[in-house]
Structures are given as C-alpha cells and as structure tokens.
Image (cartoon, grey):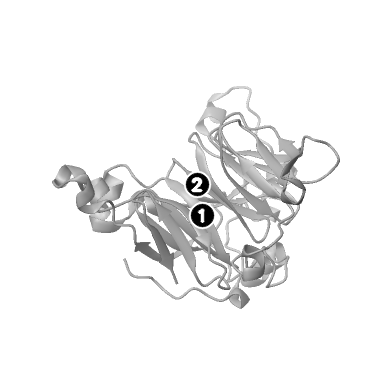
Amino acid sequence: APSVRHPPSALQMFEGGPVPIHPAVRPITEEELADPRFKPIPPKEDHEWKALVKFGGAGDQADTKEQQRSRYESAPLDSRELAPGLAKHVLRANPDLIVAAGLDYTLRTFDPRHKYKLVQIFEGHTAAVNCIDVYRGDMLVSASDDMTIRQWKIGGSDLYGELLLTIWIVKFPVKAICSLPGQRVACGGLDKSIRIISLVTGATLHKINDHQLKGPAGQFMQREGCGALYCFLHIRANILCSGSDDSTIRFWDVDTAQCFGTYAGHRGYGEDIGDGSQFRLAREFAPVWRLCHLGRDGTRIASASYDRTVCIWD
C-alpha cells in the first residue's frame, strides 16, 4: 500500500493528540452496578482518576499542541530519546553495558570492558522476556509472555536491580516494546494491537488495531489470523515503525495515532516451499521479526524476516 503522507521532521513533534480513550470521569462498569456494596467515588474526590486526566491518560478533549508539548517535551533534539537513529547512538565503539534477556524470566547486564562480567540481574517477570529497550539512559523497559511490561532502574551497588513499575497490558503475551519521548512506550504482541503507554500513570494513551484489521492482498494475512506485533523501532521524534507477522512494516505518528504508510517487502519463500494455493502464506508473504537502525542519521533501517531475507528501507 502507498504511504499516506510525508512524516514530519523532529522540529514538528507534538502536533496535538486525539481524544484519550478514557473519559474525564471514571466510568462505572456493569459488574460494579450489579454489586450492592459498590459505592461510586464522587468525581471531585477521585484523585487517582484526576491524576490520570492530568497526565493525558483520560479526558474528553484532545491535547492542543501547547498542552502536548508542555506535558511530554523533555530532551534535546539530538538525544537518543528523540533521535535514536543517529550514528553516534547506533554505532558506539565502546558500549558501557550489554543487556540480555530470555527464557529464564530475567534481564541481565554485562560489562564488555571487563570481559563481559555480570553486573546486575533484574528479576520480576514470571515468564519469558521477549524484548528490552533502554529508557532515558539509566533505565530499562521490558516486555514478557507474562502479559506485562516493566520498568527497571540500572545501577547501584546491589547485584539485583530495582523494579520501578509493572503494567498489566492484556491477556496475551507481549512480544515487543520500544521507549518513546515524553515518558511513553509502545508495546504490542499476540493481541494484534499497538498500545502507546504512559510510564507516568500506566494508562493506555492510544490503541491502534490496524495490523489486525487491514493488510495486503485484500486482508489475506488478517484472514489467516496474522497481525501480531513482534518488533518496534523508534525512528525519530514522534515517528514509530512496527513490524508484524502480517508481512508488513508500518510507520506511525505516536502523538495522533495516524499511519504514515504500510509497506510489504518480505515476499516469502517463493517456489522453494512448493506451489499451490495452500502454500500461499509462506510462498508470497513472510512475518517481520526484527527492525534496526543502520546508523545513517536515522534515514535508513533494516527489517529481518522468516523468509531468510533482510530488507533495507530508506
């Protein structure tokens, strides 16, 4: 599918956001109404919900440009938080730490300057850890099959690192996470939705279902049950790239939840896997597993796929 419109530059970040998915007043559920012991909290006394409104997780109106900028703007334009694709962030000759995670439910940091000595262990997840990302230099964020994302503090003298925040996302494994400017992260997984999460309140600011609903060849991949999210890449400022098992990568404005474009570059195994319509899922389409920067000032990225290929995108 062709791109929708040209992404803005970093200087055009914070263009105002859509209406939050939660209203300004806490809604009452059917279960609460059916409970004779339930007593609603008066809106003026509901301080937890008022904090949610204050930090953008709830409200009846979209943020203006000024409101969004005052809430989220926090870093220089050439910082890793706003421009992670710059060569100085991607191609570091002597990294301070290497972070690893896996099936043992933990994250671990190692010092490459001292024979990869173990520095810290981060325990808290109750299932395999699928993805990790650096957040603001001294923190980590992680996504796990235990259906949570978590925030961790790097450093200190203790062997075991500090868990700062746990957010239960949905009743499906979370496969990918990516730190974003403005104390936010993007996450997604087998629920086929992209969520933009506030690390201040834990609220879902946007929920995007396009990978579940729309795709190439007349939604062929979606009809086959695809659309799960397996990777994200923060391009710059408010621009995010997502990769899915529906064979596409897509570019998003995380402030407005709008799609800039949808692209399919991985074309499957072709005739290597046989002919016939029953093989179409693997012959013509292939899941996107990983995305990475190439260090060309954020203008080129790479995607890796199940079909044994790497695609370079400009």
Q: Does 19 sit above or below residue 25?
A: below
Asked if the residue under mark 2 is in contact with the one under mark 1, i.e. CB atoms within 8 Å, the reply is yes
Task: Write down the quadrant of residue 5 in the picture.
Answer: bottom left
Looking at the picture, how far across and down is residue 21, in whole percent?
A: 53, 51
The mark found on residue 123 in the picture is: none
Please identify the residue farthest to the right as the structure is shown.
157
Residue tagged by mark 2?
188
Q: Is residue 132 left or right of residue 137?
A: left
Looking at the picture, how far across and down is residue 53, in whole percent?
A: 66, 52
Dot 2: what SS? strand
Residue under the image location 58 percent in, 73 percent down: 297
Dot 1: what SS? strand
The mark found on residue 232 in the picture is: 1
Callout 2 amino acid: Gly
Residue under the image location 62 percent in, 63 percent down: 90
Q: Is residue 20 left or right of residue 75?
A: left
Location of the N terminus by quadrant is bottom left
